[in-house]
Amino acid sequence: MLIVSISRKPNFFEIFLKPFPDTFAVSNLRRQKKMKTKVILAGLLACIGITAQAQDAKTEEPKGKAIVQVFGNFHTGFGAENDDRGFELDRSYFGYEYNFGNGLSVKAVMDIGKSSDVSDYQRIAYIKNAMVSWKRGGLTLNGGLISTTQFNFQEKFWGYRYIMKSFQDEYKFGSSADLGISVAYKFADWISADAIVVNGEGYKKIQKNDGLNYGLGVTLTPIKGFQIRLYGGLNESGEEGKKDIANIAAFMGYKHEKFSIGAEYNQMWNASYKDGADQNGYSIFASVKLSKVADLYARYDDLYSNDDWNIAKDEAAAILGAQFKLGKYVKIAPNFRMSMPKADGAKNGYSAYINCYFGF
């Protein structure tokens, strides 16, 4: 058997490219790598650009906010016992709050109102808040001309400050702001505590003695919507011949998305630093939400003085009304009020109000 072997000579290109067997493959691989690198760099630049824009947008967001609240009303009495009527600009708050970040913020608020002296027809202005606050986790620290903690919780729960003050504020059991420091800590969702030390004269007066006002409060939320508040305070007289003022307050309330109801009892010993000038009283209030823009509210107060030392101002009072929200910043609240003084021979007073609120 004959086997013939035929050999083929390599052509010119095979001879020329033999020393460089992978030149074209390597070049192609490099081009692919460069293309991938460009894609990755483009993606990184895009991410950096988006991040920078987000950071710039975050930086541009305002950290401060204006505080504007104006309380006004038109009222008229009924009968010879109460013929007072007219328009009234009851209260105005103007201020600014700025948040520095990391829990640090400052707030300053002016309070423009009227004198408690019936013979003084001029408006008066006070600095109500000039304070620094710091929050971290469950801890809150406040210092300066701060809001007090004696009845702040009850006032927020009541929710109609522009119509009527909360019980302790209405009957002068304490001041809503004072110069000093306060601390609050939330131990868990169901319990928090707070303590406060202030001068004791309130925000409308400068300190005139060495006495201080101490307060300690505990707030409990055993179930959602149900809250209990206990508070005790001691306001030192700082002067010989005058007694220290002591306060206790107990509050209980339930707030639902459709309604709320609350009740508080308050006791004060040695009012105005006078021995035996004791007062006590309670307040019951409720509200029902009719719609997103309308609700009904009612409240009953009863104030007593020990041995009738303050009988001229002791009274029971009731209020019944409705509230309507006109947009985001305006509220109107028509209501009917009745006062029942406890002094001998004093007659009940009846009046109608249309309270107005503007604020943001």
Image: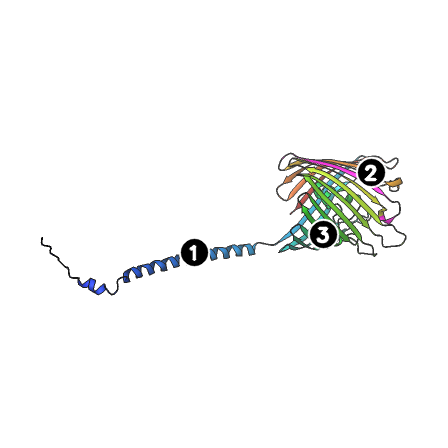
Residue at 57%, 54% in the rendered image: 61
Q: Which residue is mark 2?
A: 315
- Pick whichever of labels 2 and 1 is earlier in the sequence: 1
Circle number at residue 43? 1
Please give left or right for residue 308 compared with residue 227 in the image.
Answer: right
Up the image or down, 283 lies above or below 56; here it is above
Q: Secondary structure at mark 1?
A: helix
Write the start and end of the magenta stretch as one range: 272-292
Residue at 78%, 46% in the rendered image: 232
Q: Which residue is mark 3?
A: 183
- Pick whichever of labels 2 and 3 is earlier in the sequence: 3
Q: How much space separates mark 2 and mark 3, taking CA atoms?
A: 35 Å
Up the image or down, 220 lies above or below 131; here it is above
Q: How much space separates mark 2 and mark 1, taking CA atoms?
A: 75 Å
Is residue 63 or residue 15 the one in the foreground?
Answer: 15
Report the mark closest to the observer, 2 or 3.
3
Disc 3 crowd, CA 10 A, few/some/many (<14, 14-19, 20+): some
Q: Residue furthest front?
A: 1
Q: Residue furthest right?
A: 241
Is residue 1 or residue 76 the one in the foreground?
Answer: 1
Is residue 128 or residue 337 the one in the foreground?
Answer: 128
- Pick whichever of labels 1 and 3 is earlier in the sequence: 1
Provide residue 67's location: percent of width, then percent of height. Answer: 66, 50
Is residue 84 or residue 8 the one in the foreground?
Answer: 8
Magenta stretch encompasses residue 104: no
Magenta stretch encompasses residue 291: yes
Please give left or right for residue 8 compared with residue 292 in the image.
Answer: left
Amino acid at dot 1 = Gly
Report the mark closest to the observer, 2 or 1.
1
Please give left or right for residue 336 compared with residue 37 in the image.
Answer: right
